[in-house]
Amino acid sequence: MSFLQKEPLRKHLRRAVIAAAALGIAAAATLVALKSLDRAFPPPLPEKIAVSQEVVDRDGALLRAYAAADGYWRLGVGLDQVDPQFLKMLVAYEDKRFWDHSGVDAYALLRAAGQFAGHGRIVSGGSTLSMQLARLIEPRDSRSVASKIRQIFRAWQIERRLTKQEILQRYLMLAPYGGNVEGVRAAALTWFGKEPARLTVSEAALLVALPQLPERRRPDRFRDNSRKARDRVLARMVDAGVLGEREAARAAIDDVPTERTTLPALAAHLSDDALRAAPSETHHRLTLRRSVQQGLETVARDAARKLGDRVSVAIVLADAMTGDILGSVGSADYFDPRRYGWIDMTRASRSPGSTLKPFIYGLAFEQGLVAQETLIEDRPTNFAGYRPRNFDMDYQGDVSVRQALQMSLNVPAIRLLDAVGPARLTARFRQADIVPRLPPGERPGLAIGLGGVGLSLRDLVQLYTGLSNGGRAKRLRDGAGPDPAPLANGTILDPAATWQVTDILSGVRPPEGAPARGIAYKTGTSYGYRDAWSVGYDGRYVLGVWVGRADSGSVPGLAGYVSAAPILFEAFARSGLPVVPQQRPPAGSFRPAPKDLPVTLARFTPPGDQLAATLSAVTEPAPQIVFPPEGAHVDLAAMTETAMPLVLKLQGGRAPFRWLANGKPLAEPVRRRTANWQPDGTGYSTLTVIDAAGRAASVNVFVE
């Protein structure tokens, strides 16, 4: 090749190099300019999208949602909470090269430009999901070339800041689905009443179609439009190979919804409490179980309708082993002004009626004052000016302690309360962190045994967790606020006395028409027919029911057994929880027959109310057990090896002495101040001695 031939080639090469350099410089300058513009005008991408506050149960199931501050239903959602088939259909329909492009799909834009040139208007926008997200976070006024260019720039900015997964997630939270519904999760709940994790093919196709024209395709207003849009999505999915023809045909047969479904609004009162406790949080988890809550709310609503327009119902169900509240219904209908539905009646202080009687009897058992078959008088009695009367104004004469508690007789209960002391009863309540409300300046008196004190339904359920849990109450927790500290003690009765009470209450006849469920329960009615109560428990769960008017108005005929007890049994059944057998009796606990009772337990005689001749002859101090001491631990294994019983010793008292272990007589009365006891099992035991004057002393020991 000659020099003259080489010279033009060199010129072309120089020109190409210069052109390439110029293009590189221009590209670099453009990139620098874009980055400068990006820094100067960043996209409005908040770290957190304003979403609806939601309250969920212990397993994460939605209980209640609140509209966001702008009035839209917009629920947080993660990609793992959405049906994978829906995600495939969405990408295939809206942006099939979503995972490959950097915000703009050049092929789609060229297609859109060709359609614009051919029709003189925008037929398809060629928008990627990134561009659609840009439009959602920065709405445009019109469909124009300028707005499209702005979307392209914003999409590029978004892709620089977010991952593909984050872009898709934000789109799924902001996409419009008609009305004030935004985001796929709110849409699935609104149109199908379900979470988006498991959508049918038909449902997924409809949710893919709605965001393009959310108002024109709303199923509740434009049913035909929504069906046609869904079917177009199904056809496109067949062409894209996402669905088979038969699968799409089956999905096209399904109908579209014709009305909106109300988002869950369960546990209204506790949900409000959770929001007040942490107003800045968007996610609140309660201890409730959704299935239990749904069942209890249905029972309360149906029962209130039968009882009258102004009558309300409150229910609390708790796990006695943990204290977790699994269901809480504050009123029959939160939105019913006639029932004052917004008032949480689980926390309202009311008269508990006879529901405290089991604890009075428990203290009497614990102190060895009575056995189940001990006879006690039910006759008109004057207790220093206080004259209790039975609910039916009738008296039964001599009845057993078991009958007195099962029939909820008032006079026997007050006889026992007078013997054990109201102060001792309220002291046990305080150990369970329950402080009954009394009028200012008033001390606990005998009237508390018949409801002369203020307690809430939650208070009662917390007390009854002790009866279900072997004598140790648990502090209730609901998750609406900070978890309370565990009870320091919680002992409300000893295990033997708890079993005696439970054995009696388990024998109470169920209300008419209610099937036996193996629960122990007690009812109560406050003065003036203002409150009806029923609290029941099995070996694990405690359920309490209150019925009445929130304004404290009287309800003629209202009573615990006829009004609240049927709701109790129905609520237990509708809760779906299994029946847990009652706890086994502690070692040595049993129900002696009347013929096996010692003389001192055959009939209840209040301490200090013995025959005058006997009293005048008593000069010895009251008996006191000096060995074993209170709270002692007894080694059963060592006693078994040596075959030596435990020697019991007492001081004071008047012979002869009757010794009892867990209410069971050890032997005939003896005049010695010592006795022998061979435990028949491990666990807590109560040892009691009763002297000839009817005075008793007890100690609690633990056999290990």
Image (tube, rainbow, N blue to C red):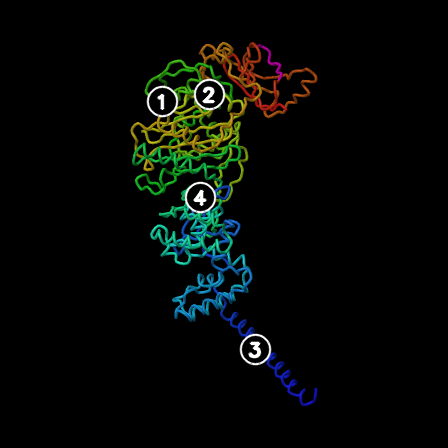
Callout 4, which amino acid?
Answer: Leu
Mark 1 vs 2, N-terminal side: 1
Q: Is mark 4 on a helix, strand or loop?
A: strand
Q: Residue furthest front?
A: 1
Q: How crowded is mark 1: few (under 14 residues within 10 Å), some or many (20 or more)?
A: many
Callout 3, which amino acid?
Answer: Ala
Between 571 and 356, which is closer to the camera in this rendering?
571
Q: Does the magenta stretch include residue 676?
A: yes
| Residue underneath mark 4 | 63
Mark 1 vs 4, N-terminal side: 4
Magenta segment boundaries in residue numbering: 670-678
Image side of residue 386 versus residue 576, left or right: left
Instruction: Give the CA separation, mark 3 to mark 2.
Output: 94 Å
Mark 3 vs 4, N-terminal side: 3
On residue 258, which mark appears? none
| Residue underneath mark 1 | 388
Q: Is mark 1 on a helix, strand or loop?
A: loop
